[in-house]
């Protein structure tokens, strides 16, 4: 469980680095979006046949970061409209 949280934080932090501009997200939002991104990326990698969603693999990690970048962009657009 702790490893899953750390992976989500790392994925969220990488997604914030790859997303251009300044994001107004706190640590918990970064962690949450990283966790959700890792679940989405792991699921897509699993559907492509790379192994279990809970295994660490390169394709799952890359897809997780991409999913987290998209989630951060979506969160910014939703938060910006308020």
Image (cartoon, grey):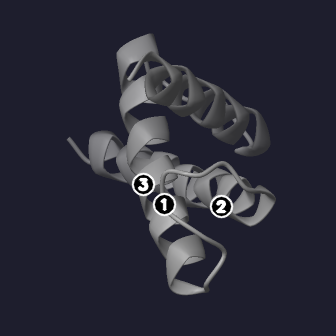
Left or right side of 53 for 81: left
Give SS at disc 3: helix
Q: Residue at x 74, y 58 (%)?
A: 62
Q: Quadrant of the C terminus?
A: top left
Relative depth, front residue between 20 and 32: 32
Q: Is residue 56 above or below residue 14?
A: below
Q: CA distance from mark 3 to mark 1?
A: 8 Å
Residue hosting label 3: 39
Mark 2 → mark 1, Cα distance in angstroms: 8 Å
Question: Looking at the figure, which quarter contains the N terminus?
Answer: top left
Say which residue label 1 marks: 53
- Residue 48, placed above or below residue 80: below
Which callout, 2 or 1, points at the residue further toward the start of the chain? 1
| Label 2 packing within 10 angstroms: few (<14), some (14-19), many (20+) | many
Q: Is residue 79 above or below residue 54?
A: above
Residue 60: quadrant of the picture:
bottom right
The reply to whether discs 3 and 1 touch (Cβ–Cβ < 8 Å) is yes
- Closest to the camera, between mark 2 and mark 1, is 1
Q: Are marks 3 and 2 in contact (CB under 8 Å)?
A: no
Asked whether the residues under the numbered discs 2 and 1 touch, taking CB atoms below 8 Å apart as contact, a structural biologist would say: yes
Rounded to the nearest whole Å, what is the CA distance between mark 3 and mark 2? 9 Å
* Residue with the mark numbered 2: 60
Q: Position of residue 80 (x, y in %)?
A: 35, 42
Q: Is 14 left or right of 43, judged from the image as shown?
A: right
Dividing the picture into quadrants, the one containing residue 5 is top left
């Amino acid at each position: 469980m702790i490893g899953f949280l750390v992976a989500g934080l790392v994925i969220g932090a990488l997604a914030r680095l790859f997303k251009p501009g300044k994001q107004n997200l706190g640590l918990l939002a970064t962690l949450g979006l990283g966790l959700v991104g890792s679940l989405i990326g792991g699921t897509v990698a699993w559907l492509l046949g790379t192994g279990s969603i809970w295994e660490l693999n390169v394709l799952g990690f890359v897809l997780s970061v991409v999913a987290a970048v998209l989630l951060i962009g979506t969160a910014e657009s939703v938060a910006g409209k308020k």
